Amino acid sequence: MVSAGAPRHHPLDSASLEHLVTARYDYRPLARIFGTHTRDSKIAVRVARAIVREAGRLRVAPSLLAGVLLTENPRLEPETVSSQGAIGLMQVMRFHAGEFDCESDDLRDVDANICHGAGVFGRYLERTGDVRRALLRYNGCVASTNTPNCHRYPAKVIQAAGEVRREMLRYREGG
C-alpha cells in the first residue's frame, strides 16, 4: 500500500526515455547511429548535433527528425539533389532557403539544411497538429503527385524513427 505522502512513480514512455538519454549523453547516441550510415565521422557528429539542437527548438523527439533525415537521405550525402530539385540531407526545396532563422541559406551545408528541414517540418506540424499529416506535407503528398506511393512516407519515417529511438535507448557510453 502506498502512503498518501509517498511520491507517485509514473511509468516513462519511450519518448520520455529518449529525452533522458539526450539530456545525459547529448548528441553522442545519434552520432553513433549516423556513423553506421557514413564513413565520415565528422558528418555523423555534425548531423547528430544539428538534429538534437533542432529537435529541442521544435520540442519534438530527436528520433523523429532523424527518421525524416534517414528516410530522405540514408547515406548522409549533403550534396545530394533529387530529380525534383530537393537539396541535401533533409531534401529541402530551394524556395525554403531563407524562410527560417538559420545561420546560412546554403542548403548543402549540414547545419543549414537540417535547420531548414526542421523548420519546414515544424511549420507543417504546427499547421496540421498531426505528425502523419505533417509528414505527408513534408513529402509533398498533399496535392502533388511527384512522389509515387507518397502516402507510405509517414510509415517509413515513423519506422525509421522507431529504429533510431531503440538504438538510442540501448546506448551505453564507451560501448
Image (spheres, rainbow, N blue to C red):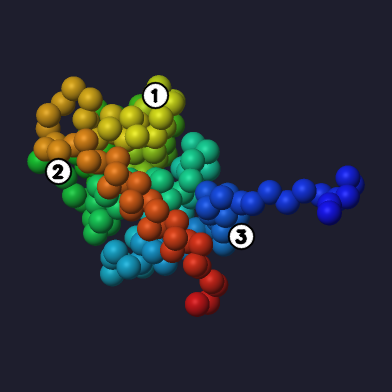
| Amino acid type for the residue under numbered disc 3 | Arg
List the residue tagged with mark 3: 24
Position of residue 33 in the picture relative to residue 142 (left or right): right
Q: What SS does tag 3 mark? A: helix
Q: Which residue is situated farthest in the bottom direction here?
A: 175
Do tag 3 and tag 1 residues touch (Cβ < 8 Å)? no
Determine the CA span between mark 2 and mark 3. Answer: 36 Å
Q: Badge 2: few (under 14), some or many (20 or more) residues near its Cα, within 10 Å? A: few
Is 143 above or below relative to 67?
A: above
Determine the CA span between mark 1 and mark 2. Answer: 26 Å
> Where residue 137 sits: x, y (%)?
28, 29
Q: What SS does tag 2 mark? A: loop
Q: Badge 1: few (under 14), some or many (20 or more) residues near its Cα, within 10 Å? A: some
Q: Residue at x 24, y 59 (%)?
A: 75
Q: Nearer the viewer, residue 128 or 69?
A: 128
Q: Residue at x 57, y 58 (%)?
A: 21
Position of residue 84 in the picture relative to residue 160 (left or right): left
Q: Nearer the viewer, mark 2 or mark 3?
A: 3
Q: Which corner quadrant holds the N terminus?
A: bottom right
Do tag 1 and tag 2 residues touch (Cβ < 8 Å)? no
Is 160 above or below relative to 117?
A: below
Determine the CA span between mark 3 and mark 1. Answer: 32 Å
Q: Residue at x 39, y 38 (%)?
A: 118
| Amino acid type for the residue under numbered disc 2 | Ser
Q: Residue at x 38, y 51 (%)?
A: 161
Q: Nearer the viewer, mark 1 or mark 2?
A: 1
Dot label at residue 49: none
Dot label at residue 82: 2
- Marks 3 and 1, the one that precedes in the sequence: 3
| Amino acid type for the residue under numbered disc 1 | Thr
Dot label at residue 128: 1
